[in-house]
Amino acid sequence: MSKQYKVLAIDDEEDNRMLVRAALESDDYLVEIGINGEDGLKKAETFMPDLIICDMMMPDIDGFEVLKRLRAKDSTFAIPVIMLTGIDSRDKVRQALDSGIDYYVTKPFEIGDLLAKVETILKNSPSPTDDNGIPGLF
């Protein structure tokens, strides 16, 4: 049996966190939650997810700063990121893509669309990591 993919969802809004968590867990992903940017960064280091879904607008540090800090560390540099946000301005989309995100999803969103993006990213990624952060052999 192969390992589950691990996904970290970072969002300051509880309803969004619970919606994303329920959708991912129903598709058999192992999910960890970050309640804000700082919490998400800490959990990225300890949970070592295969993918991060991050809200753009948060009160402590925004999604751009989270991404910048993730990309600055060797341990989190290559983790794919989906930016989830209510902002759909062309400038913000371009800024997010230029910053190194993999997908940009605007709220409100269809769960099926988000799950399809998650699957696309993970299908093109190395196999899930084991508990030590080492790529699995399955």
Image (spheres, helix red, strand yellow):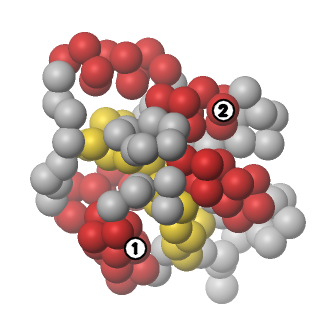
Q: Amino acid at mark 2?
A: Arg
Q: Which mark is residue 69?
A: 2
> Residue 81: image x %, image y %?
49, 42
Residue type beneath disc 1: Arg
Where does the C terminus fall, quadrant-wise?
Answer: bottom right
Callouts 1 and 2 close, C-beta under 8 Å: no
Q: Can you give x and y, in whole percent of width and height, for residue 132 in the image?
A: 86, 66
Q: CA distance from mark 1 to mark 2?
A: 23 Å
Res. 18 visible in picture: yes
Please tell me which residue is depicted at 48% across the width and 29% down the height of the picture: 64
Q: Which mark is residue 21?
A: 1
| Residue 20 appears anywhere in the view | no
Q: Nearer the viewer, residue 79 or 3?
A: 79
**Circle 1 Cα neighbour tier, 10 Å, few/some/many (<14 / 14–19 / ≥20):** many
Q: Earlier in the sequence, mark 1 or mark 2?
A: 1
In what element is the residue under mark 2?
helix
Looking at the figure, which quarter contains the N terminus? Answer: bottom right
As drawn, the residue found furthest toward the front would be: 59
